Amino acid sequence: MVSRSVAQRGFTRLYDNIRQRNIPSVASLFIHVVLRSHKSAWSDYIDFRDYLNNNADVAKEYEDLKIRLVENNKGEINREKYMDGKRDFIQKVLEKAKIK
């Protein structure tokens, strides 16, 4: 089982991300696991990544958005709220990526 293997290496699951046990307040790694039956989800990850890599201005907008979301929620670990704050931006980028 993946979670057992991850735990044996000193990590724990918290708010849908993986944190090192010895640094509980710092997310050090995110693992995206996509089932083979969900090929469109994997394609979305790749399309989003490629679009940002090819459009520095959009990548900067995404970076700024992520920083604002963290700054607006200091002291609060709420992964769902953070993801919700990025959702519309990601959707718009994916729509642009699919047109190209």
Image (spheres, rainbow, N blue to C red):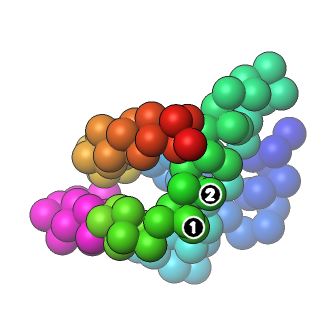
* Residue at left offset 67%, top offset 64%: 11
Looking at the rendered image, the quarter that the C terminus falls into is: top right
Q: Dividing the picture into quarters, in which one does residue 64 lie?
A: bottom left
Q: Dividing the picture into quarters, in which one does residue 25 lie?
A: bottom left
Q: Can residue 31 be seen at all in this image of the molecule?
A: yes
Do the residues under discs 2 and 1 have CB atoms within 8 angstroms?
Answer: yes
* Residue at left offset 77%, top offset 57%: 6
For the residue labelled by badge 2, is the local secondary structure a helix, a strand or a loop?
A: helix
Residue 43 vertical placement versus 77 (above, below): above
The location of residue 2, given as percent across then percent down, is: 81, 45
Q: Residues within 10 Å of mark 1 (few under 14, many from 20)?
A: few
Residue 41 vertical placement versus 25 (above, below): above
Q: Which residue is mark 2?
A: 50
Q: Which residue is mark 1?
A: 53
Q: Residue furthest top?
A: 37
Residue type pointed to by label 2: Asp
Q: Is residue 8 left or right of residue 94?
A: right
The location of residue 16, given as percent across then percent down, is: 51, 45
Residue type pointed to by label 1: Asn
